[in-house]
Amino acid sequence: MSKPNQTLGEFIIENQSDFAYSSGELSRLINSIRLAAKVVNHEVNKAGLVDIVGAYGETNIQGEDQQKLDVYANNKFIQTLTNREIVCGIASEENDDFIRIEGHKGDHQNKYVVLIDPLDGSSNIDVNVSVGTIFSIYRRVTPIGTPVELEDFLQPGNNQVAAGYIIYGTSTMLVYTTGHGTNGFTLNPALGSWYLSHPDMKFPESGTIYSINEGNYVHFPQGVKDYIKYCQEEKDDRPYTSRYIGSMVSDIHRNMIKGGIFMYPKSSKANNGKLRLLYECNPMAFIVEQAGGKASDGFQRILNIKPTELHQRIPFFCGSKKMVEKAEEFMRVSE
Ligand code: AHG
Ligand code: MN
Ligand code: MN
Ligand code: MN
């Protein structure tokens, strides 16, 4: 039950029993994420004032030029999560390999792994456009008391116990799910508290926005080209409006409120598209499904896919249920 002016802290305590394994650990984990998010938010807000914009000077495992804030956010989240006795492992977009956390006593008693995209849309930092953070949480599958292994991270999205994103936008929001609906909290920067502003978010069943990088049009599969033409046709409620920020978190957040579809398909340049299954698509799929939306790779449900690699990429179609179904129809016909 949501109450007016309820803080995130109050909400977590009240909904403790929603967590799959309710021992307070997952609540503490979310608490540490909201704390790191506030610190990163503060830093993102200073971009332009201090020397934190621009390239860091290194390339990550994705082959992307890391931005200074990519590195800052990565360090901040890892530091905050490591300091609590809850997390046994972290995998990040910015790290080649997963990190093992043995715990202060060195006995590997912690139960949860976190996968994180510390800064999503980082190419937008220098131009003052909103960016985000995405996180995904699983309970480990290897025995407690042993070091965490790769298989703890390579679980299908269905096994997520919680997932969320933070959007550093005109206001800063934290949106998350534990599998009992999706709730959004807005940060009051004066007080440093998150307030429940978007209780039980509902993805409109259909919408009139399509979001895709159309610059890649000639490289898209025929099904995607045909679907784009369908979106542009003069019929019924079409043509749809095209909106593409280039920060997936912001694009999907907008579509979740207004109704729309976000697509990052494969192309003749990138066989699996660009987005990463484990720390981008799975958490967004969980959040979106919990709000009544749909997420697919064009043919199958994202959350059913068994990952094979930490940095695995996957085509992504995500948004209003009816729109994703229609895009899938086009994909099937052209196969
Ligand atoms: P990240 O900044 O975490 O590397 O993710 C960038 C992603 C995603 O946010 C966005 O939707 C997409 O890249 C944009 O890619 P294009 O510039 O190829 O459209
Ligand atoms: Mn990146
Ligand atoms: Mn990203
Ligand atoms: Mn990123």
Image (tube, rainbow, N blue to C red):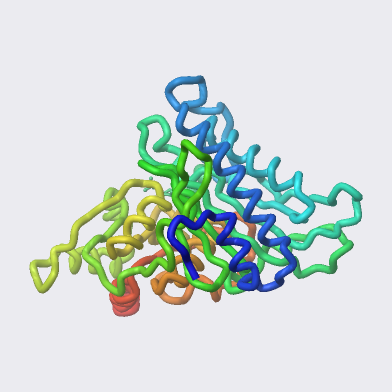
Q: Position of residue 13 (x, y in %)?
A: 63, 62
Toward the top, the furthest residue is: 50
Residue at (91% x, 50% y) in the render: 105
Does any portion of residue 69 appear in the rendered image? yes
Does any portion of residue 267 appear in the rendered image? no
Residue at (39% x, 71% y) in the render: 293
Toward the front, the furthest residue is: 4
283 to 216, vertically: above or below: below
Q: Is residue 148 left or right of residue 42?
A: right
Toward the left, the furthest residue is: 234
Residue at (52% x, 45% y) in the render: 193
Residue at (46% x, 57% y) in the render: 196
The image quarter in which residue 258 lies: bottom left
Query: Quick one: quadrant of the C terminus?
Result: bottom left
321 to 168, vertically: above or below: below
Q: Nearer the viewer, residue 208 or 62?
A: 208
Q: Position of residue 232 (x, y in %)?
A: 15, 63
Q: Is residue 27 left or right of residue 23?
A: left
Q: Position of residue 170 (x, y in %)?
A: 36, 41
The image quarter in which residue 252 lies: bottom left
Q: How many marks?
A: 0
Q: Nearer the viewer, residue 130 or 309?
A: 130
Q: Position of residue 180 (x, y in %)?
A: 53, 73
